[in-house]
Amino acid sequence: MAQARRELLLRAHRHQLRKEDLEDCYSQATLELLARARAAGTFSTRAHMANALEQRFVSRIHDRRRALCGRSPAQAALDDALPLGGCSEGDIEVADIRAEIDKLVMLRMDLRSLGRVMHNLTPDQRLVLTSRIDSGMDCAQFCSRFGWSKEKYRKVAQRARARLRELLASEEGAIRRPPAQIDARSRAAAAR
């Protein structure tokens, strides 16, 4: 009976739930009907059995819809969720924020370059730059803490930034320039 009525009932109630949910409800109704039959519950006719199956199926549909409409917030959230990372049309692609490896590598290289050239700044210039970076200290806070005038702070900071740009540019040029040994080898290889 359950097998014969399956397609008919799923088609008749397809407007109420998704196909997966309808199949789940139908399976539950069938299991309940089998449990009733095993517990000595007899059905008088095949029509009685078909009506009992449909009644349990509709009851499971109503339970599922109630759960989706707010009785179960977790179930409602799961029902509205979209699948992640699949290849279907409606699936969502999850962006990996760490996927931009080239950008991360460039930032790390800049940080290493900064570490190599910082020692070429004066102690006052390093103090001004690190106070801005480490503690986010503004001019007024720095001047009150170290007893500097605002004009001295402005000039030291300006010179520190200019010197740092100059040092980083020369560092970048040194990295891009091939060493003399490699250059001599490549010329020798090209001559062959």
Image (cartoon, rainbow, N blue to C red):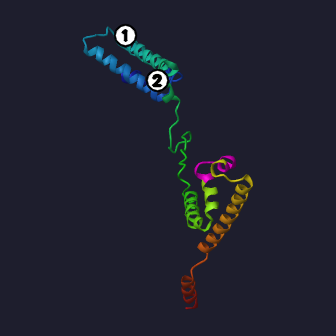
Q: Quadrant of the C terminus?
A: bottom right
Q: Which residue is mark 2?
A: 10
Is 23 drawn above or below residue 47 in the view shown?
Answer: below
Disc 1 is placed on an element classified as helix
Question: Residue 23's spot in the image, x, y percent?
Answer: 43, 26
User: Residue visible at 68% across and 68% down?
Assistant: 166
Magenta span of residues: 131-143
User: Residue reaching furthest front?
Assistant: 147
Question: Residue 45's spot in the image, x, y percent?
Answer: 34, 10
Whether residue 1 appears in this view of the structure is no
Q: Which residue is mark 1?
A: 48
Which class describes the residues within 10 Å of circle 1: few (<14), some (14-19), or many (20+)?
A: few
Is 9 drawn above or below residue 148 in the view shown?
Answer: above
Asked whether 86 or 73 is in front, the reply is 73
User: Residue visible at 30% across and 14% down?
Assistant: 36
Select label 2 or label 1 by which is in front: 2
Checking the image for residue 20, the label placed there is none
